[in-house]
Image (cartoon, rainbow, N blue to C red):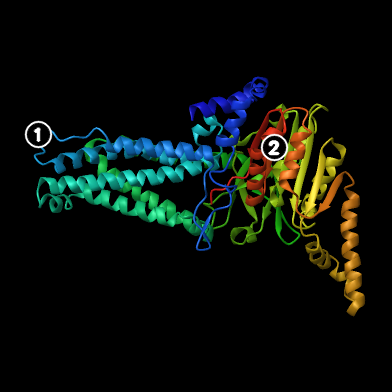
Amino acid sequence: MVVSGIANWAVLLCPRLVMRLNGSFSKALKRHITLPAMHSTNKNVPPKLFGLPHGLLPTRAESLIIFLFWVYMILGSSIGFHHVSGNPIWKRPMGEIGRLVADRAGMLALFVYPMLILFASRNNVLMFFTRWSYARFNTLHRHMARIFFALVITHGTGMTINSFGISSTKYKTRLQEGYILWGVVAAIFMGFMLVQSILVLRRKSYEAFLMVHILFAIVIMIGIHYHINSFGYQGFTWVTIGIWGLDRVIRWGRMFSFGVNEASVTLVAGETLRVTVSKPKHWNSQPGQHAFVSFMMPACFWQSHPFTAISSNENELSFAIKVKGGVTLSLYKHLVSMPSQTATIKVCKYSQSLLMASGNGIPGMYDHAMRLANTSSKHSVKLVWVIRSYKPLSWMYEEMKKLGDTKVETIMYVTRPDDSLDYTNETNASDSENKSGEGKDEANEKSCLSRVQRLQKGLPHIEFKEGRPDIDCVIKEEFTQAGGSVAVVACGHDSMVDAIRYAVVHNLDATSHRVDYFEELQVWA
C-alpha cells in the first residue's frame, strides 16, 4: 500500500521522471502484475456458476495483496504454539493450545475490525494517500470481511476446544455467560451477512441488500462490543464506530454544501435520463471524477449512487443516467456530494491520449477530451465512443458538436445501426399517421435514414463506423504510431473495458514509449 502510494503520487508530482521508467522491468511488471486481470480477460465481467454471477475477480495486483493478507493471518493464527508440561492452569494440551489459538485469532480479528469498516468508507483517508479507487478498496473490504469471519470462527473453535479441554461441564457453563452469547450472536450475523452479500443477490435488489447489510452491521457491532467490553478492549468498538459515523457526517456535510436543488430531468431516446443541476462556485470537478447522487424520495433518500459528471459550463453539472428501473424511473430531486478526488487522472502529462468509452461511459471521456483540447498542439487526443445505435447521440449531440472546434480526433462505432430505425420511427410517427401500407413503411425508412444522415452531417468532424470495433487492432495501431508516451483511459460496458485492459497488456511491446492504462469504470455491485 505504501509502495503503491509512492508510485501513484510520483506519476502526479514527477511525471517526467516516471516517463523515463519504461525499461524491460517496468513493462514486465505491468504485463504480469499491475495491469492484467487475475485470470483470462475478465475483471469487470463476473464468472458464472450454474448461469448465475457469483463474484467479481480482483486484478492480479489486488489478488497478490489479498493473498499476502491471507498468508499473514493464517501464519499469525497457527505458529508458535506449544504445551508446557506441568502447567498448573492448562493441565491438558488441548486446553492450552485451544486457548492460545483462540486468543491470537481474536486479537488479529480486533485489528482487522476497524480496517474492515475503513475500506468500505467513501471518505477513506487511505484513498488520498494511495490514490486507489473506491472500487479497489471495496474489493479489499469484501476479502477483509472473509478474513475477519475466518478469524472469528477460529477464535470460537479455539475457545470451544479449550472449554472441553478443561472439563466436560465448562462448555455448558460458558454458554450461559452474557459476553459469550453476544459473541455467538455476532458470529451468526456475520455468516448471514456474507451470504446476503454475494453478487447475485446484490444485483437482484441492491436496495434490499444495502438495507439488510446496514442492519446486520449494527447488530454485529453491538454483539462485538458486549463480547469484548469486559476485557477492556472497548477502544476497538469506539474507533470502528467513529470511522463509520465520521464517514456519514462527511457525506451529509458535502451534500448540504452543494445544496438542495431542483434538477432538470429529461428522458432522451427512451433509455437515458439527462439530469442537469446548478452548482455552487466552490464546487470544482475534474474529468473522470464521479459524484454520488441521492434521490430525495421517501423510499430511497438514504441511498446514493455514483455517476460520472459532465461539467458543461461553470454554473451547471449534468449526468447521463441509464434507466434501469427503480428510483431512476421517478427521479425528480437530488443532492450531490463532492466529487471523488481519488480518480483524478493527469493524462495531460502524456504525449498522446486514447480515450475509449461505450454507452453511458462517455461523460468522463468527453470531459477529458475537452480539457485536453486546450493542451499543447503536440499532444494528440483520440476519442473512441462505441454505441449500440444512434440513440445516445440525441443526449450528447451538443457536447459532441463542440468537439468540432478542437484538435480531438473522434471516432464513433455504431454496433447495431438498424436499431436506430425504431427510435427514429417513434420520432417521426406523427408525420406518418396519414400514410398506410407499403407507402408508410417506405416513408418511415426514408425518414429514418435522413435523420441519421442529418446527425452525421451535423458532426462532420466525427468519423462514423458501423459494426463492432476490433479493440486489439485499435490499441495496437495507436501504440505502433505513438511518437511518445501514451495514456489509455477506458469507461463503459464491463466486457469492453476488460477487452481494452487485455489489449493494452498484450501490446505493450508494440511501442518503445511508456504506456499507462487508467480504468474509470468502478464496479462494486
Q: x and y percent of residue 38 in the render?
A: 53, 43
Q: Quick one: 189 or 6, which is closer to the camera? A: 6
| SS class, disc 2 | strand
**Residue at 63% from the left image edge and 60% from the top image edge:** 324
Give left or right: position of 96 versus 449: left
Mark 2 → mark 1, Cα distance in angstroms: 64 Å
Mark 1 crowd level (few <14, some 14–19, many ≥20, 10 Å Cα)? few
Q: How far across and how far down the image is residue 192, in percent?
A: 37, 56
Instruction: Give x and y (percent) for residue 102.
Output: 24, 41
Residue in the image at 42% along x and 36% along y: 68
Q: Looking at the image, can residue 411 be seen?
A: yes
Q: Are marks 2 and 1 in contact (CB under 8 Å)?
A: no
> Amino acid type of disc 2?
Val
Is 436 left or right of 478, judged from the image as shown? right
Q: Which of marks 2 and 1 is nearer the N terminus?
A: 1
Residue density around tag 2, few if under 14, some if 14–19, many if 20 or more, within 10 Å: many
Query: Which mark identifies residue 488?
Result: 2
Q: Position of residue 310 (x, y in %)?
A: 71, 43
What's the residue at 45%, 39% (across, down)? 66
Front position in the image: 4 or 338: 4
Q: Which mark is residue 85?
A: 1
Q: Quadrant of residue 408?
A: top right
